[in-house]
Amino acid sequence: MTNKIDSIKETGLEEFEFTTFYVGDLLMGVDIQQVQEINRQLDTTEVPHAPECVRGIVNLRGEVVTVLDLRVILGLDATEINDKNRNVIIKADGENIGLMIDRIADVVYARLREIEPAPANISGVDGRFIKGVYKLDSELLVILDIDEVIKADKREGPEM
């Protein structure tokens, strides 16, 4: 497996901004440049025969957006809807995708030299979904590999 930190280094940037959120007790982040918006639109329309991780679709200002349950993709129990849940809308492969998360956190600034390779397994989460980790004062920020997450909705079966 290639070092995912290398894909971060290839950007040529020295500092990054991450939009952060919680999935369970795990603080996760995605490059803020991939985030289109964060919204509360949690009423989805079910998609028959879709993989378990596809929560449904929503109409976002005239655009149909697929919403993925990030907890399911990461191998956790499905999200139970409450008032803290949000959809993080990201741009991937030319389309907007919603990631249903437990609760939003903050924007975190990270220097490239302080981002470390991810351990193979963090809190039971498959390492293929993680680009790296960044140590904050009180917790660890897990940097999500959006490309791997998006591929997950095309997979079926127990390997998800």
Image (cartoon, rainbow, N blue to C red):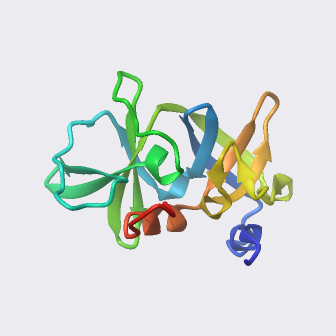
Residue in front for this viewpoint, 107 or 153: 153
Q: Position of residue 117 (x, y in %)?
A: 80, 60
Q: Position of residue 48 (x, y in %)?
A: 16, 58
Give the residue at x 38% y 45%: 37
Count of numbered badges drawn on the protein: 0
Give the residue at x 38% y 35%: 86
Give the residue at x 75% y 39%: 140
Q: Say above or below: 109 vs 143.
A: above
Q: Is residue 84 left or right of residue 50?
A: right
Residue 38 quadrant: top left
Residue in front for this viewpoint, 32 or 78: 78
Give the residue at x 18% y 57%: 63
Q: Is residue 129 left or right of residue 99?
A: right
Query: Looking at this rendering, what residue extends furthest in the top direction?
Result: 83
Q: Position of residue 153 (x, y in %)?
A: 38, 63
Q: Quadrant of the N terminus?
A: bottom right
Q: Position of residue 13 (x, y in %)?
A: 72, 65
Residue 41 quadrant: top left
Residue in front for this viewpoint, 117 or 33: 117
Q: Say above or below: 152 vs 74.
A: below
Q: Is residue 50 left or right of residue 59?
A: right
Query: Looking at this rendering, what residue extends furthest in the right direction?
Result: 113
